[in-house]
Amino acid sequence: MKSVGQHLSPEARKLAGQIQAELGTDATPAALGNVAVGLWMTGRLQVALQLMGAAIAADPANTDNQCNYAAMLTMSGAAGQAVPVLEALARKFPDNPTVLNNLGQAYYQAGDEEKSEKALGRALAVAPGHPQAAATQSEIAENKGDKAQAVALAKQAVQRSVSRDKLNRLRKLGYKLTLADMEQSRPADPDPLGLHNFVHPPFPTNALEENRTHREWAAFYQEVQTRLQTLQQRLNAAQAPAIAAANAQALANYERIRSGNLTGGAAPVAASTQTGVGQISLTSQENEATTVVRPFAQKAKLMLDLLSRDAGAKLRLKRAKDALADFVAKNQQLVETEYRAEYNKLGRKDANQTGEGQANESYCDRFLALADKYLAKWSDGRETLYNDYLHQLELKLSEEVYWQQFLQPRAEFQVTVLKAQIEWLSAFMSAGIRTDGSIGIQVDESCLAKKQAPRGGKLANFNDVHCQYHSELNLGIGTIVTDCDKMVSNLGIGPVKLGLSQDMAQGTDFHDSFVSCTVEISAGKSAEVKAGPVSIEVGAEAGVGVEIGRNGVQDVYVTGKVEASAMNVVGSGAEGRMSLISGSGSVKML
């Protein structure tokens, strides 16, 4: 550690000392280590190294700090010093993917690709979705000339989290992602709108059923039309604030560019005074404008792009819609011509003299036979075509809405939801049923021996699409609160009142470059260090992951034992745990 300290700038050592003094003697080595990782996340590499060294000195047995310090050393160009520490941790925790990855990254930076490949392979065996291990393995495969394996591993690296660095690497390899490549990243059964709950009335196959179902369809259609009117009114009211919010944001971006208020870099920017002195908000700067990093946003953007380019899904929906429309048009024409002509020949003037012994005794038999004949034509495949169209539309709307919730501000997303609901209800009107509930085949109730009780359809209520992803981690150094369309990450440096906002501007003596890495943040207790550093394997403690690339924070995602439909993680106090998971990038600082 002493040799490392000699390479750090006097300013970094001074600031680290001030932070440690402000934290005071009550700060545990675990809390001090968390502060160091928090500073690393914000690009303060030298200060983070100095503080982590102090945390190690205070408690050499803390394995979280050991692993994190070794990761920092690797990414600072001192992999040789990191290897012995990580080898010892790997002997103690042989199946911990964080340790194995960090060891593999250290070997890779030290130039030993054979050992690196072995360690990273073990990490991937335990945690197949490990983002950094797969990315570096891809580089090793490319170095060996195995482009196919390099592409396969690069695709594996984007399954858990997506970053611009990873997508650029795939482009460099000449590969364009497809929806099939991301199949395991897609929700198994997304239904944010509750479309599964909607049930249409049955289709009639004979005259007896037609007598019942035309009433059910008439009532169903009336409810659909009433609901559509209400939704359109809500949409009209919702569009105005959404447009106003978008215009305000565009104006703010324009004013920022016009005034030259740009940092010109990709580092996180300091929080405003509203968040408290000494707090740092995780944001990234892209395309000359500061944008808040949203959880799952990178993956959502990628998935929506892939969905929009999925020719197969578009073709299936179009074919289903066209097939239903063609069927309906054909049979409506059949009713208007052939059926109507045959019906007019039935001797309607004596229709009231039906039944045994009456003048028109055979009328009902002939009428029912005619009605059944054309109802059979209508029933032949119509329900299958109708349900297939609804199914293809449900797939489209459900997955699009699922991913859009992570990208759009609430006002804009509400407009998206209302449009999807309108499109869904409008589709129910395509069954070829008239507004009176019939298909144009007249049924004389006097010829029906018995009426059956209505069964009806089920025009359900749409689900309220509330954000199902929420995490609140209090790590002692501040909080990271994550919801679908926003992440408020205030990494306050304990009680420090040093005015770090001045130092966060890129180009100062204190600011360092970003390197590729991941930070896993767990709600677990510090006592769990006996089980090894926080890891991203399946079944690990629930938490939040932050993907950091050369342009700063690039993605935020869920880790551990969390169902995709109900993410809720709450950590407590300084007991929260953070693991720094190194990547192949290095600033060669030491």
Image (cartoon, grey):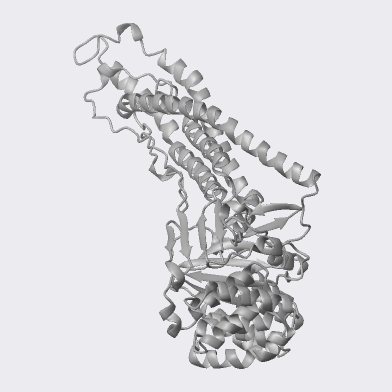
x 31%, y 29%: residue: 209
Residue 330 image position (x, y, % from top left)? 54, 28
Q: Residue at x 80, y 43 (%)?
A: 258
Q: Is residue 178 left or right of residue 23?
A: right
Q: Nearer the viewer, residue 184 or 484?
A: 484
Q: Is residue 138 visible?
A: no
- Between residue 509 and residue 39, name the one nearer to us: 509
Position of 23 with respect to 217 (left or right) is right
Asked whether 22 or 544 is in front, the reply is: 22
Left or right, 445 with respect to 167, comes to: left
In the picture, residue 279 is in which quadrant? Answer: bottom right
Taking 412 as reference, is 331 above or below it? above
Vertical relation: 146 (above or below) 224:
below
Viewer-proximal residue, 58 or 91?
Answer: 58
**Could you tell me residue 167's position as x and y percent?**
70, 64
Viewport quadrant of the C terminus: bottom right
Identified at 39% across, 37% down, the residue is 461
The quadrant the N terminus occupies is: bottom right
Relative to 532, does residue 214 appear above or below in the rendering?
above
Q: Position of residue 481 (x, y in %)?
A: 50, 58
The image quadrant of residue 353 is top left
Is residue 396 at all visible to an observer of this figure?
A: yes
Q: Is residue 446 above or below residue 207?
A: above
Count of number-bearing discs:
0
Q: Residue furthest top?
A: 349
